[in-house]
Amino acid sequence: MKVCIGALVLFISVSLLAVDACYYGAGKKFCMTRVDDTVSYRGGAPMKLTGELGIRFADGTSEAARRKLLSLYLLSAVGDIEGLPQYVRARPAPGGDVFAISRRLVESGRVKWAQPVWYERPHLLATTPNDTYYGEAWHHGMIHSPEAWDIVTGDPRVVLGIVDCGTDTQHPDLFSHMLMGNSFASNEPYVDPDPSGTNLTAYSRAHGTAVAGVATATGNNGFGVVGVCWDCGLLPVKYFGNEMIIPNDRKLAALTWTVDNGAWVINNSWLINQDKDGDTCKLNIPYDNYAGEAVAYGKTNGRGGRGTVMVFGAGNSACDTQWNDNFKNLHGDILVVSALRSNGEITDYSNYGIYIDISAPSGFDTVDNKGLVTTDWTVAGMGYNPHFMNDLPDQSYTKFFNGTSGAAPVVTGAIGLMLSVAPYLTHAEVIACVKQSAAAGTQGCIHGSDEECYGAGVLDVQAMVENAKNGLCGGTPECDGPEDCGEGECWNGICVEAGTVTDDDVMPDDTVPDEAVTDDAVEDDVDATTGADDMVQPDQPTVDDTPVTDEPTPDADGQNDETPGTDAIDPVNDDNGCGCSLL
């Protein structure tokens, strides 16, 4: 049914009929299957629509211009992201179709992107352990942590953001270098896990604490465990909590906050929704503009413009990453990590494929009985320990953490060590140095070429630190001494606030530490998606003479590799001359 209202169009959805529902992202069209208010992607799990659109206005668009465009499309603003007014959530008039309106907004050339908002279920990547024995922290030997620690053990200025489901702020191996975090979980204002929750299993509530420990648990303090970058700063962010089903725009709020509050590297040991149904791989993760925007924001604005690097676990379903559209379209701007056994083989649970960037140890699958020793929730009985037999006597720790959730923070901590000796490296130089420093995988790949299991290879933090320190990873130091920094001081090639450099920061090359111790798409005036000048807000929608055509059939991967606007339907003029259109 079609209804004309002034010069605009309302698109009436037909309940209970499965139809293609498409939106634009990363310069392509992504089509989902829609039944009433539920959508699915490539046969994956259903996701419920909120009935709202997420709109990313151009930088510099005034509040008046934003209100005018919303009014023109009969949209009512229902919220934005604090501190980021260019991102707006809006609800259409009754009967308005969020997919059709989002496409028209992009096709008009006056917004960077627009897409429906849906609820998503973040899926933690740590697999449930099924064995009981673990000996030592074998993963440090695999990546050559001790050799790297001979050079550097981290620096509190290098802040690692752990975006997860809560971190134990009282843990004795974490709190000494923990910064003030934030919670984005509904009705959970604290960073700590919620002990009263019922949706998460007890050990899942400890997930963020375990991830944090792998990356940055304090070392050489006489107790507990040691993280890869034990002197790095820790910024805990609770992205989701007990509610488990969350609107997809929350990731942008959580990740941009983490960037703005000083994270140099951000660890993401979670996926959106399950990627497997029984024995069938269904990587039903559509490209999300909110994820792409968060990555671009970190790359452009993090670390004073040098770029915050985001690390993602590949997933634990033994599925091919080529069907994950976020990994596909963000390839080169993020690091996706597969998980290895203690003998260097890929684990039987790890996802694989051409979008794996690097591999790292995690272990503990049906063949390997070794997991990662790390921090656990200190609330007695509420973490991984003692839910599995023969765990460590101190329930503040566990030896059963694994999954790509464990592999990802190994990489995050390694980047922290590298940036501690070469903080001037850019976003692109960091990613390149991780890859060029990797050791070759030696165990072959059951899924195809070595690159599909290992990516660039096996993480080697010793090589990363040495290469960065010796100038083999590129980068240009901005200072050689305090005279180059005005009122500040020079620390490892960058200027920092006066008084923050200590004697411990200056280590001769032959000194061993004491044993006790740009892409600018966001800023571009031209819309990276449409090629249109998005700084101008005309009074009327652009009239497009392109005739109305049916929606193109999606490619085999669910995408239409075309530029938005090639099948544009203008909200004022369409084929029947009354400004109306069918869904």
Image: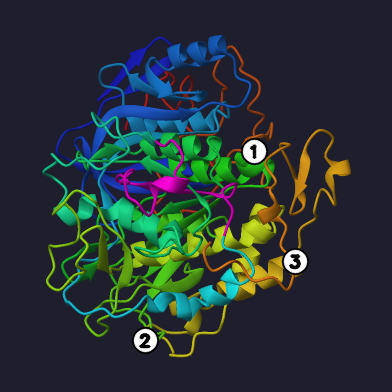
- Residue 412 x, y percent position in the rendering: 49, 59
Looking at this view, is 86 or 82 the one in front?
A: 82
Q: Is residue 520 visible?
A: no
| Residue at numbered disc 2 | 446
The answer to which of marks 2 and 1 sits earlier in the sequence is 2
SS at mark 2 in the image: loop
Q: Which amino acid does label 2 sit on?
A: Ile
Snapshot quadrant of residue 282: bottom left
Residue 130 located left or right of residue 145? left
Report crowding for label 1: few under 14, some 14 to 19, many 20 or more residues within 10 A (C-alpha). some
| Residue at numbered disc 3 | 508
Snapshot quadrant of residue 238: top left
| Residue at numbered disc 1 | 531
The N terminus is located in which quarter?
Answer: top left
Start and end of the magenta stretch?
154-181
Q: Which residue is located at x 61 percent, y 72 percent?
A: 150
SS at mark 3 in the image: loop
Q: Are marks 3 and 2 in contact (CB under 8 Å)?
A: no
Report crowding for label 3: few under 14, some 14 to 19, many 20 or more residues within 10 A (C-alpha). few
Q: Are marks 1 and 3 in contact (CB under 8 Å)?
A: no
